[in-house]
Amino acid sequence: MTVCTLGFYFLSFPENVRRSQFRMLVLLIGVSICQDGLWFILNRDAEDDDDDGGVERSVKSFARKVSYISFAWRILVAIVLWKDSLDFIAIVKAKNVDTDALSLEQRVNNIIYEHRNGENEFN
């Protein structure tokens, strides 16, 4: 859940995120998917609990089906975010970035550009 929340934040405010951070998010989603796959393998619950008369069987079945749907959804989200990580620069450039959200490197480049243009006007 935390990884998906970070993904939504990164996509909502890409001007605050670097490409390497976004790629790490995609890696974390991959690790999460592997962890969930391992959980599905280790937690099969093949035998039913007969202590309660089989009442838990329907609850476990429902929970497992929802877990499979969630697992499939996370795989789709991982594919979309991986594709976005490949086009990350285009996504950032398509956004309107205010000057307060510029990185230090971009601010320095803007200052150098303005300084050079200012010098040419006075000479």
Image (cartoon, helix red, strand yellow):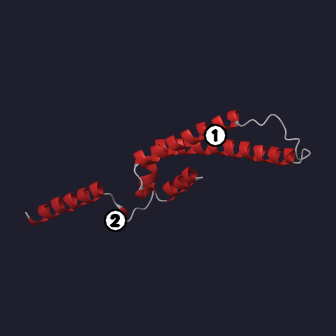
Could you tell me how far apart the alpha carbons at marks 2 and 1 are, in whole angstroms?
A: 41 Å
Specify the label residue 99 is tagged with: 2
* Residue 8, quarter of picture: bottom right
Mark 2 falls on what kind of element?
A: helix
Residue extending farthest to the front is 51
User: What amino acid is labelled 1 in the image?
Assistant: Asp
Residue extending farthest to the right is 53
| Residue 103 coordinates in the image, percent (x, y) | 32, 57
Q: Note whether residue 100 is visible.
A: yes
| Residue 51 coordinates in the image, percent (x, y) | 88, 44
| Residue 86 coordinates in the image, percent (x, y) | 47, 41
Indicate which label's residue lies in the foreground, 2 or 1.
1
Specify the label residue 36 is tagged with: 1
User: What amino acid is labelled 2 in the image?
Assistant: Thr
Mark 1 falls on what kind of element?
A: helix
Which residue is nearer to you in this view: 19 or 61? 61
Q: Is residue 88 left or right of residue 44?
A: left
The first of marks 2 and 1 along the sequence is 1
Q: Is residue 118 left or right of residue 89?
A: left
Which residue is nearer to you in this view: 100 or 44? 44
Circle 1 Cα neighbour tier, 10 Å, few/some/many (<14 / 14–19 / ≥20)? some
Query: Residue at 43% of width from left, 48% of height from top?
Result: 21
Q: Note whether residue 87 is visible.
A: no
Query: Residue at 52% of width from left, 41% of height from top?
Result: 82
